[in-house]
Amino acid sequence: MPEQLNPIAGKPVLRHVLENIRQCGVTGIGIVVDARDRHIATAFRDGTGLGVRLTYLRQEQPSGPAHGVALAR
């Protein structure tokens, strides 16, 4: 299971992050995920349950944060 899904205070860490981003007024969020990992997409689906719109950006191979930023562009 990805670290982002480890629970803190009864919710996955990533859920806390997404809720905080939504509270800032951002409703369209891209999440860089490993191409083999479906856990995050299964947990959050399209983001409707959180009041956001999630887009999953798949990295074929982990290539570091700069590659994730390039995918987001």
Image (tube, rainbow, N blue to C red):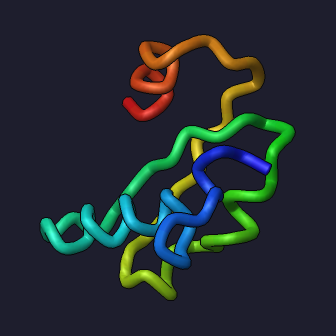
Residue 13 percent location from the top left of the image: 49, 59
Give how far across and how far down residue 2 sits, in percent.
71, 46
Residue 9 image point, x, y percent: 47, 73
- Nearest the camera: 9 or 29? 9
Please state the horizontal and vertical placement of residue 33, each as a whole percent of the image.
Answer: 65, 40
Q: Residue furthest front?
A: 9
Number of marks: 0
Q: Residue at x 26, y 66 (%)?
A: 20
Height in image: 23 above or below 7? below
> In the displayed image of the protein, which residue is found farthest to the right?
36
Q: Is residue 10 left or right of residue 51?
A: right
Compared to 34, does 45 lie above or below? below
Quadrant (top left, top right, bottom left, bottom right) of the C terminus: top left
28 or 49, nearer to the observer: 49
Q: Residue at x 81, y 45 (%)?
A: 37
The quarter holding residue 51 reads bottom left
Q: Relative to residue 31, is residue 72 drawn left or right?
A: left
Image check: 27 left or right of 7?
Answer: left
Q: Is residue 23 left or right of residue 8?
A: left
- Which residue is at 49% across, 58% downward? 14
66 vs 25: above or below: above
- At a point 22% along the width and 64% down the height, the residue shown is 26
State the residue in front, 58 or 40: 40
